[in-house]
Image (tube, coloured by chain):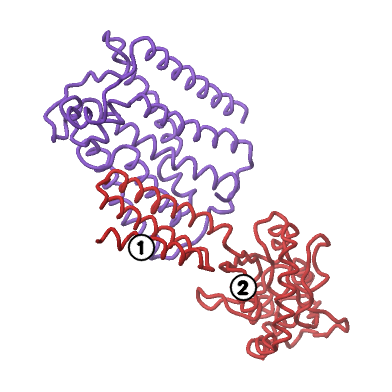
Chain colours: A purple, B red
Amino acid sequence: MSVHRSALAVYAVVLVVAFCGILLALFAYHGPDESSGRDYINRGVGDTGAVNLVSAIYLNYRLYDTLFEILVFSVAVLGVRFYLTDQRASDVVESVPESHVVRRSADLLFPLILIFAVYLVVFGHLSPGGGFSGGAVAGSGLLLCSVALGAGVVARRFHERVLERLEWTALLAILLLALLPLLAGRPALYDLLPRGTPGRVASGGSILLYNLLIGFKVFVGTWVIIHFFIRHRGEI
Amino acid sequence: MTQTALLLLLPVVAALTLCQRRRLIAVIGMGVFSLLLSAVYLLAAAPDVAVAEAAIGSALVTVIYVLAIRKTGRLVVVGCEVPGLLGREGKRVVGLEHDVLEGFARELGLDLYVQFVPRESIEPALLRGEADIAAGGLVKGDSAQELCTTPVHLPTAKFRIVMRKGAKPLAEFGGSRGYLSDIVEAVRHKQPLDVTLDLARFMTVSRQDLTGYEVERLPEESAYTFLVNPNRADLVSKLGAFLGKMQEKGELEAFIRRHMS
């Protein structure tokens, strides 16, 4: 237990240091951006290559804000894990028998929900959606399964431990992606990838990559929060 | 136009949701509210917000609430199976105590959830907080001190069934421990036995051929009771009041006649 907790503490320290690094990099390279909303609308597609202007703003112009949103989410997940690890794990809620209809519909619906979530994430720069909504949709799908099958079964079936590792890897990848331009002699958060033809899936520079990583992070994070509450407190 | 209609519908749905007594329906009402709201966002040319509202407001939050009320919105009853009091008919739970508790759960706005366990697991389950109420032919005075009992609701009698010719007296049945089906099985195979049973269990066992067994009605007065989780002291007074009300209205008598005759 203590090993587990110290590992979590290391994660927390790494997070804080990494974000302080980004902060310093930004102050060193980036002055205040004074372009107005009209400018965004007129130049958005040309600047970023993303047809969906909302994505263009929160994953390109305002990526800095979005990184801190991800930080808030990660700290929330970390907090849940940190404070619930001490509580006795209970098996009370594990085996709630649900009717055949509910179980079968969850089995049938889950792949469809997952496909829709992937669509939202992958087409986030072209149409409404994006990493946050897509991740939340996939997370709700997993929760639907845990309502129908029991949280323990879902945790085993979806290899929770592996998923949790990958969640932190995704966070690390987002930070690296944000800092990578520094190596190329550009300001941090600068989009290195080509803009592409607006309207194609392969367009919008790094927005697609960010959406994929954020979508995965939100998906696993949602699940971790809920499952920790179920396992350690027996309730939400 | 459509937007105005949806906007007018929103407070109506909100009010209906707030008026619901059953939590599950209220949660579904909240999901409907979010879905309408996301339609409003869509018509207001904000499809990104609409997608987020639909995903989080009407899907994620609804599922989280459903998971939460599945635990807290239930009145969890543990008990052993006793035909007439707390029995099973296929997948349905039936019996006198079930009907009483079902009415009680409805009055509290909860869903009744019955879990069948062996007699000796009942008290530990209550003390661990895994259940709110224990039922299933529990006789007053048989259980641990720290568990609250509700006021008496049904008189019973104790019957002792004895056959001592074998060396093995099946002591594991001592009192009314174990599953009733084990005792019935023992009687069917004419195994030696020494058990004290309450009225409902005795009625079930007496459907078997009891020749060779000595049956004795113990003179002491006894009564069935419900046990309540010591952390849920509020339930003791509520259940007591509910039983009192049923007794006053004569509903308890009707239940007893329906199930025990």
Give the structural element (helix, strand or loop) at label 2: helix
Kind of residue at badge 1: Leu
Q: Quadrant of the N terminus of chain A?
A: top right
Residue B8: image tag: 1
Q: Callout 2, which amino acid?
A: Glu
In the depicted structure, whether residue B259 falls above or below residue A43: below
On screen, residue A82 versus residue B144, left or right, reads left
Q: How many discs mark residues in the rendered view?
A: 2
Going by the image, does A5 lie left or right of A66?
Answer: right
| Position in image of residue A171 (x %, y %) | 39, 27
Residue drawn at point x = 42 percent, y = 12 percent? A24
Instruction: Please rate how many residues cluster around mark 2, counting C-alpha atoms within 10 Å: few if below 14, some from 14 to 19, many from 20.
Output: few
How would you rate the neighbour count of disc 1 (Cα within 10 Å): few for under 14, some for 14-19, many for 20 or more? few
The numbered dot on residue B107 is 2
Residue A206 location in percent, x, y?
25, 26
Q: Nearer the viewer, residue A151 or A133?
A: A133
Q: Quadrant of residue B157?
A: bottom right
Subunit of label 2: B
Q: Which residue occupies 62% across, 64% down?
A: B76
